[in-house]
Amino acid sequence: MTTNTYTNEEFLSLYKKLLLPRMIEERMLIGLRQGKISKWFSSWGQEGISVGTALAMNPNEYMLTMHRNLGVFTARDIPLRNLFAQFQGKAEGFTKGRDRSFHFGTNEFKIVGMISHLGSQMGVADGIALANKLQKNNEATLVFTGDGGASEGDFHESINVAAVWQLPVIIIVENNQWGLSTPSSEQFRMKSFADKGIGYGIDAVSIDGNNFLEVYETVKYWAEEIRKNPRPVLIECMTFRMRGHEEASGTAYYPEGLIESWEDKDPILQFENFLKEKGVLTDESIQTLRSELSEFVLSELEYADNLPKITPNKETELADVYAPFANKEILPKAVSDREIRFIDAISEGLDEAMKLYPELVLMGQDIAKYGGAFKVTEGFLDQYGADRVRNTPLCEAAILGAGLGLSIRGQKSMVEMQFSDFVTEGFNQIVNNLAKAHYRWNQNADVVVRMPTGGGVAAGPYHSQSTEAWFTKVPGLKIVYPSTPEDAKGLLLQAFSDPNPVMYFEHKKLYRSLKSNVPQGYYTVPFGKARIHQSGEDLTIVTYGMGVHWALETLVKYPEIKGEVIDLRTLIPLDKETILQSVRKTGKVLVLHEDTLINGFGGEIAAMIAEEVFEELDAPVFRVGSMDTPVPFQAELEKQFLPNAEFEEKLLKLYKY
């Protein structure tokens, strides 16, 4: 410890920073009892970690926080009135009343708050650190996790990625020895989280988290180290949670005498005693400072109390789900006279995007030298280099989180799922982080997730599922599903121009079996605009992906049926007008998709048609999907599973209705 290098003024400044969150918390506990705030996660006794780390980092460096990091927000001088407005759900808070307490971020103060799913912030930290490394800006990133949250898979995935990629990120494990009511003895077997560093191949140390100066100086040392020589470090901060996980849960589960044994280790009390020994503080000056800070906190709290309550507005809420996007169509410069395969069109789209967006980073398993499982990125490593075409470990959650982190630092990313089925490993990052970031705190997620999908290739239940309906109900995502090579390229380029998260589905069976005229160069196909592949007067077929080809092939067998085939191209946004206009014309409609029937996206389309144009229908709305079983492996069983035969039967039935 190098305490002799501080002046009395510096000591006093540090003490005020350490004391402020405690003074705020005293007021918050009163506000909780008065019903002015709905919930409170106490950092009582852990302030030394939050304040020490925040002061050790440069103000322009990102910190990713959790429940008990009030001191990070105060040490970064966030206006308390806005912080209190956040706690009270006022419009002047950072989430406009849409999320609670510390579940928010602010780019102005370089803080990214948590979501309730512990551990997910760690992948985001990897992405921010990766951007810092690529941009060569000599910045560190710091992310918090707890001893309980460190049991999550995100913890392992994210540290492993940081180690493999040598990312300049500091992982702070706040070991307060309890996960809600579960003690550490029931959470893990090792003695110290510093021991984990050996397994990950990174530096790791354990320190006294209640020793404010030790936290400050340790983090300062490692931040300076990894700015010069990028690599991750894990710092375990030993501490204790003096109050409940949140106030309503209480502390009745603590063994008798445990709280009392930690009271003398309180970081504020320890620092006060230290400064009194050095002659910097006296009991009288401490009381004076506490009174001054208390008055300041009270005045800011009164300001927030007097702010008006939010007036709900549907238009405002809906408008903030997505970041603004013009969604313009850019036409190709020339008519195409060449035919290329579906897979080549996707590869061309990626190549055009890589040229247009130098900040774009591609990430996925085996996508570099090997070119990906389906060879979509073959040759990209040689052309664009290992910084931008990145093989990843087997860790979907961490990489999807890293996509959000890259976006926070102004970079685009593409994450390739080797098969769309594997997206379950990163589901939380997509539906709770990527999808909700803009709505919650005005941070877009400029991430395209490529999803090789679909059956018909005898790949079995874990490589053949149609997974689009898992995501169509999640506000904040856009769902794209092309059926032709020309649309595949144009829609992919539109996905990269859109600042919002896009789930881009590409049917594996079409990769090498389908060719069409695809324009060279750059062009885009707008989202939310369906394509009519064939006009007709007898009935409407609404479909997408492989369903388009099943419909067209079946109609060839029955030339007497004048069917209109609508290819949705994007499910979210959905082109309702084209569907309804066609149904009004034909009076009959059949909705077809490869996904299983129950809860497939076709149910939403059928409900919309029944609600909007019921009186203009000449027959019930028909739906056709695959069997409600997992996708079987054996070819004949898979053929039975898929909806082709049933589609033909229902098409004839609807025509004759």
Image (cartoon, helix red, strand yellow):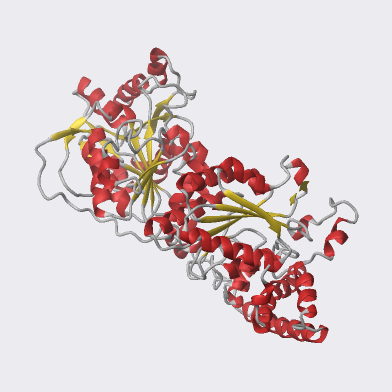
Query: What residue do we see at 23% from left, 41% from top?
Result: 348
Q: Height in image: 436 above or below 35?
A: above
How far from the left and from the top, in percent, is residue 365?
41, 36
Q: Quadrant of residue 309?
A: bottom right
- Relative to 98, is 15 on the left or the right? right
Query: What residue do we see at 52% from left, 60% from top?
Result: 225
For this rendering, which residue is in front, 13 or 214?
214
Q: Would residue 476 be visible to someone looking at this image?
A: no
Query: What residue do we see at 77% from left, 68% from top?
Result: 33
- Relative to 283, is 68 on the left or the right? left
Q: Quadrant of residue 480?
A: top left
How far from the left and from the top, in percent, is residue 47?
70, 66
Q: Height in image: 323 above or below 336?
A: below
How far from the left and from the top, in percent, is residue 590?
34, 32
Q: Would residue 121 be visible to someone looking at this image?
A: yes
Count of numbered tags: 0
Q: Height in image: 301 above or below 323?
A: below
- Pick the quarter of the image with the N terminus: bottom right
How far from the left and from the top, in percent, is residue 645?
35, 19
Q: Quadrant of residue 411?
A: bottom left
Q: Height in image: 184 above or below 644?
A: below
Query: What residue do we see at 21% from left, 34% from top?
Result: 536
- Pick the quarter of the image with the C terminus: top left
